[in-house]
Image: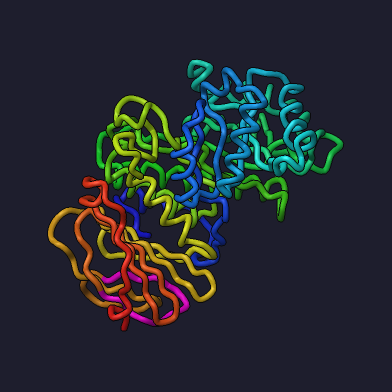
């Protein structure tokens, strides 16, 4: 994908990342959060239809007042019925024994009634909840509870994976202190073969007033690259490889509030975030959230379903596209125009490509080259796939197309801002005649 803005491009040039086209896409990548109160049967059903692969149980209110075990068990059952992986948060305000007891409850006492929970978080946005203290002190604050909690949890089940610290942003100084620094939580538990922390997780809600599709997406890109480079650095520092290698994910993400969440641009921001998460090999990106504040488009409505008619929003649709059609290995795309983002996924003989037009104006003719080539002038996109075809089509302003190539068959999904505004679903069609 081509990133928008010279500062973003300059930032990327000075960072060494994984080579293109070798990135395996996590089968748990596309996720969401279940809010503090059960959202109801219709929301659970729509969430299942979206194809989400991970659902996190956590958040600020949850951290302060943990639901009882019966409620949590009900939610975990529903998550597993959806077919998603659970990420379960333990409260930073409890005790190490409380955290260990929750692992024991799910992974030992209720084993057979539900599948054991592999992925866990400790705490939620500790810097923010502590009143925004000086960043130099935050690593020590988190280390103080994270290490004893993690040791107690893994004493119950050493196979679990624990993420943290779930800051409200990618806070560089505290993260540097906690990941390979003076308050290192990525080392082994003394006398054991396992580690305190297995993954870096952070949250982000861009606070700008511009179009989320561009301004919000650029905001995320910088943080995604930093997250990838941080875990690469710590893995090399501690020789963590294979199943012991640190991984990373986004525990919460969305626009800054209800009015911005219910926009077309927010949906395309989700599409960009998930594309970069594939490129930089995130384990999961769980949006906040399934449904809250009645889907009212105001205040803390961070839902991916609109409350007016219980209609999936643009954020939901872009998550659905990635969850259902982007599997296998990430394939990088290039474009000559910053209004566009293009990327793909190769899974055996199936190639899926997403094209997002974030610009305004008349419909544009384009050519999509499915193999790296000198495409010449014009609006030419290139995906370095296993194929050698060229696909030609037209794309409208503020729209997203997903193209699924299987042999000589092409399925086209077209979804536009007008569809979103009129609460219409994406349009599926055959576009085989466009392939040359």
Reply above or below: 407 against 164.
Answer: below
Between residue 85 and residue 124, name the one nearer to us: 85
Q: Quadrant of residue 367?
A: bottom left
Reply above or below: 396 against 57.
Answer: below
Reply above or below: 70 against 365.
Answer: above
Farthest residue, direction front: 41
Position in image of residue 362 (x %, y %)? 13, 60
Magenta includes 346?
no
Farthest residue, direction right: 191
Q: Residue at x 35, y 39 (%)?
A: 310
Give the magenta part as a residue range.
Answer: 380-392
Farthest residue, direction left: 362
Q: Residue at x 35, y 71 (%)?
A: 382
Position in image of residue 260 (x %, y %)? 29, 35
Between residue 28 and residue 149, name the one nearer to us: 28
Would residue 362 be found to the left or right of residue 415 on screen?
left
Q: Quadrant of residue 288?
A: top left
Would residue 390 be found to the left or right of residue 75 on screen?
left
Position in image of residue 110 (x %, y %)? 75, 36
Q: Which residue is drawn at 27% across and 41% down?
A: 263
Q: Which residue is drawn at 40% across and 77% down?
A: 371
Farthest residue, direction top: 131
């Amino acid at each position: 994908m081509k990133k928008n803005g010279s500062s973003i491009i300059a930032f990327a040039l000075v960072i060494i990342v994984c080579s293109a086209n070798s990135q395996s896409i996590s089968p748990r990548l596309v996720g969401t959060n279940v809010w503090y109160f059960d959202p109801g049967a219709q929301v659970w059903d729509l969430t299942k239809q979206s194809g989400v692969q991970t659902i996190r149980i956590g958040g600020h209110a949850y951290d302060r007042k943990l639901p009882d075990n019966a409620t949590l068990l009900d939610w975990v059952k529903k998550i597993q019925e959806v077919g998603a992986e659970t990420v379960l948060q333990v409260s930073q305000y409890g005790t190490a024994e409380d955290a260990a007891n929750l692992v024991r409850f799910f992974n030992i006492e209720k084993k057979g009634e539900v599948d054991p929970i592999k992925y866990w978080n400790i705490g939620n946005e500790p810097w923010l909840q502590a009143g925004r203290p000086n960043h130099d002190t935050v690593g020590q604050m988190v280390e103080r509870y994270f290490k004893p909690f993690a040791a107690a949890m893994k004493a119950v089940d050493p196979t679990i994976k624990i993420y943290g610290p779930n800051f409200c942003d990618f806070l560089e100084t505290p993260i540097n202190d906690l990941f390979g620094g003076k308050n290192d939580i990525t080392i082994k538990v003394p006398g054991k073969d396992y580690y305190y922390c297995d993954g870096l997780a952070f949250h982000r809600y861009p606070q700008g007033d511009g179009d989320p599709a561009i301004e919000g997406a650029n905001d995320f890109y910088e943080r995604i690259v930093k997250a990838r480079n941080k875990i690469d650095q710590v893995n090399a520092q501690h020789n963590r490889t294979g199943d012991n290698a640190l991984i990373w994910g986004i525990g919460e993400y969305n626009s800054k509030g209800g009015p911005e969440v219910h926009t077309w641009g927010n949906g395309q921001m989700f599409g960009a975030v998930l594309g970069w998460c594939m490129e930089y090999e995130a384990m999961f990106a769980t949006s906040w959230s399934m449904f809250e504040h009645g889907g009212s488009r105001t205040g803390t409505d961070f839902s991916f379903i609109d409350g007016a008619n219980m209609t999936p929003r643009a954020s939901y649709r872009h998550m659905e596209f990635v969850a259902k059609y982007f599997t296998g290995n990430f394939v990088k795309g290039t474009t000559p125009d910053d209004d566009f983002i293009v990327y793909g996924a190769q899974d055996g003989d199936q190639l899926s490509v997403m094209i997002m037009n974030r610009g305004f104006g008349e419909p544009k003719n384009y050519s999509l080259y499915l193999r790296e080539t000198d495409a010449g002038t014009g609006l030419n996109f290139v995906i370095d796939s296993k194929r050698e075809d060229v696909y030609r089509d037209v794309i409208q302003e503020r729209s997203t197309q997903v193209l699924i190539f299987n042999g000589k068959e092409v399925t086209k999904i077209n979804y536009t801002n007008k569809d979103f505004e009129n609460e219409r679903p994406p349009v599926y069609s055959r576009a085989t005649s466009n392939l040359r």
